[in-house]
Image: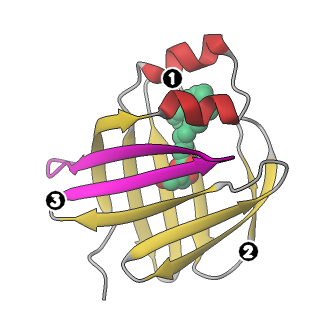
Amino acid sequence: MPTSLCGTWDMISNVNFDGYMSALGISTYLRKIALRLKLKKVIERQGDQYIIKTLSTFRNYAISFKIGQEFEEFTKGLDNRHIKSTVTWQGNKQKCEQIGEKKNRGWAHWVEGDKLHLELYCDGEVCKQVFKKNVNE
Ligand code: VL7
């Protein structure tokens, strides 16, 4: 049984976010804004439904899904694409495959100690974000 991803997590590092956003075709203007953000993840589970919220002072984004069930994702306020997403467990990693216009797109979450790790993939670019558990929220 993998350590729970659930909780509130504050970003402490963000490597190659710019490369990931470039691969998604995000404008220079928006990338500059996004690069300054300290993202927060709120991960909840209600029964077999997961909810992942990405929060910032600029924009918020949320998805909800069941493990192994493909869902339609619209990346509203991000790259605004329609994709088909499926989240599965692979060992202790929760992995999402995002099928659409962009190749090799997806992400993986896992916990090590009190840190939440996230890798974001698009078209050969890998962004690595690490979050620290926020015990006050
Ligand atoms: C979601 C953003 C950059 C456009 C705005 C930046 C606002 C705050 O896919 C993600 O998370 C998964 C895994 O936790 C769950 O949805 C990452 C943030 C990536 C991509 C696009 C810049 C404009 C960012 C919402």
Q: Relative to 78, does residue 30 appear above or below in the rendering? A: above
What residue sits right under mark 2 in the picture? 70
Looking at the image, in which quadrant does ligand 1 appear?
A: top right
What residue sits right under mark 1 in the picture? 34
Residue displayed at 30% across by 89% down:
1
Q: Secondary structure at mark 3?
A: loop
Q: Horizontal placement of 27 versus 46: left or right?
A: right
Q: Horizontal placement of 113 versus 15: left or right?
A: left
Q: Relative to 18, does residue 2 appear above or below in the rendering? A: below
Which contiguous range is marked in magenta?
A: 114-137
- Asked if the residue at tag 3 contacts the one at tag 2, i.e. Cβ–Cβ closer than 8 Å, the answer is no
Work out whether mark 2 precedes mark 1 in sequence or the reverse, and give the earlier one: 1
Instruction: Provide residue 97's location: percent of width, then percent of height.
Output: 66, 65
User: Which class describes the residues within 10 Å of circle 3: few (<14), some (14-19), or many (20+)?
Assistant: few
| Residue situated in front as seen by the camera: 111 or 50 | 111
Residue 74 magenta: no
User: Which class describes the residues within 10 Å of circle 2: few (<14), some (14-19), or many (20+)?
Assistant: some
Q: Is residue 20 visible?
A: yes
What residue sits right under mark 3 in the picture? 114
User: Which class describes the residues within 10 Å of circle 1: few (<14), some (14-19), or many (20+)?
Assistant: some
Residue displayed at 39% across by 48% down:
41
Q: Determine the CA span between mark 2 and mark 3.
A: 30 Å
Q: Residue furthest top?
A: 29
Q: Horizontal placement of 78 versus 8: left or right?
A: right
